[in-house]
Amino acid sequence: MTRVTATELRVAISDLLDRVARHGERVVVERYGKRVAALVSPEDIELLEAIEDRVDIEAALQALREPGRRSWPKVKAELAPHRPEGERR
């Protein structure tokens, strides 16, 4: 895995994108010594999304096995304080 600073990224973005696309290389972008972003291949992001989907499905199945039910209005009321600003109801 390659690590670059944000400044280095600006200079070498074309080369880095080529390395990711052609060779599947992973590039981590750091700002002030901390990881802030990554360049990954489409295959890597598809794998990550598949893993996330699997985790979500397992959590949903577990929730369905839990006893008791809650009405939709009650769930909406519980989630309302966590709604991002400007999001439609």
Image (tube, helix red, strand yellow):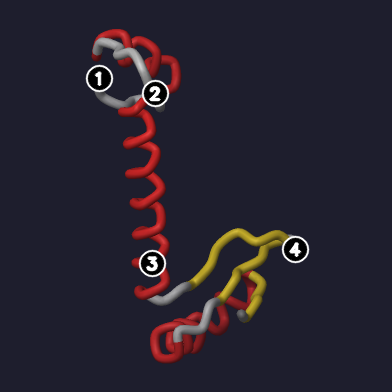
The disc, 3 or 1, on the residue closer to the chain's N-terminal end is 3
Residue that label 3 marks: 47
Measured from the top left, where is residue 19 in percent x and y?
A: 48, 88
Q: Amino acid at mark 1?
A: Arg
Residues at marks 2 and 1 touching, judged by CB atoms closer than 8 Å: yes
User: Amino acid type of disc 3?
Assistant: Leu
Label 3, label 2: how far apart the Cα atoms are: 29 Å
Judge from the rendering whether residue 38 lies leftward or rightward of residue 31; answer left or right. Answer: left
Residue underneath mark 4 = 33
Residue count near mark 1 (Cα–Cα under 10 Å), binned few <14, some 14–19, many ≥20: few
Kind of residue at badge 4: Gly
Q: Residue at x 51, y 83 (%)?
A: 25
Amino acid marked by disc 2: Arg
**What separation in Å lies between label 2 and label 1 (alpha carbons)?**
9 Å
Give residue 30's quadrant in the image. bottom right
Q: Secondary structure at mark 1?
A: loop
Residue 87 image offset from top left, x and y in percent: 31, 27
**Residues under numbered marks 2 and 4 in contact, where contact means CB atoms less than 8 Å apart:** no
Q: Earlier in the sequence, mark 2 or mark 4?
A: 4
Q: Residues within 10 Å of mark 2 (few under 14, many from 20)?
A: few
Q: Circle 2 sits on which residue? A: 83
Image quarter in which the N terminus is found:
bottom right
Q: Nearer the viewer, mark 3 or mark 4?
A: 3
Q: Label 1: which residue?
A: 89
Crowding at mark 4 (Cα within 10 Å: few <14, some 14-19, many 20+): few
The image position of residue 23, as x and y in percent, is: 45, 90
Residue 44 to residue 68: above or below = below
Residue drawn at x 39%, y 38% as measured from the top left:
59
